Image: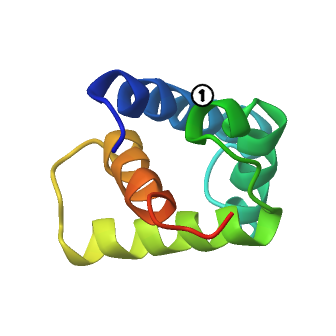
Amino acid sequence: MATPEEIKDLARLLGAAGRAHHEVFGGPNQGWAEWYAAFLIDNDLESRIGFKPDLDRVVGWLEAADEQHRVEASEERWPDYYAELFFSRTENLDR
């Protein structure tokens, strides 16, 4: 189970990915999930979640988090929501 500090740390990294993506693209783009996933992996996602996921797995987490966040119309900040979802997806994985 992730600690609140671990969730906050991952949320900060996700927020940094969002800011960097905006600087590069200026807004939405079709390949956002792949771009974010590469950014997260390149910026030590492994140390935050305890193993090195492949790009496709991280893309899947991002797309699932985005869809759930929209469906639930959550008012929670997206980086916090995504971080919680990432940890929920990694807890019982066969790594």
Q: Which residue is mark 1?
A: 16
Q: Quadrant of residue 47?
A: top right
Viewer-proximal residue among 19 and 37: 37
Residue 22 found in image quarter = top right
User: Coloring scheme of the render?
Assistant: rainbow
Residue at image x 67%, y 62%?
Answer: 58
Task: Locate the N terminus and report the quarter of the image it occupies.
Answer: top left
Q: Is residue 49 visible?
A: yes
Query: Residue type at mark 1?
Result: Ala
Q: Is residue 30 visible?
A: no
Is 5 placed left or right of 13 in the picture? left
- Of 55 and 69, nearer the camera is 55
Front-most of 38 and 95?
95
Secondary structure beneath dot 1 equals helix
Q: How many marks?
A: 1
User: Where is 71 relative to 59, above or below?
Assistant: below
Q: Which residue is drawn at the image coordinates 69% and 61% (left, top)?
A: 32
Q: Residue at x 71, y 41 (%)?
A: 40
Quadrant containing the C terminus in the rendered view: bottom right
Q: Is residue 50 above or below residue 63?
A: above
Q: Quadrant of residue 39?
A: top right
Task: Give neighbour class at mark 1: few <14, some 14-19, many 20+ (Cα, 10 Å).
Answer: some
Q: Where is residue 10 drawn, in percent x and y? A: 50, 33
Q: Is residue 6 left or right of residue 13?
A: left
In the foreground, 82 or 16: 82
Q: Is residue 92 above or below residue 14?
A: below
Taking the spot 46% from the left edge, 66% from the top edge, the residue there is 92
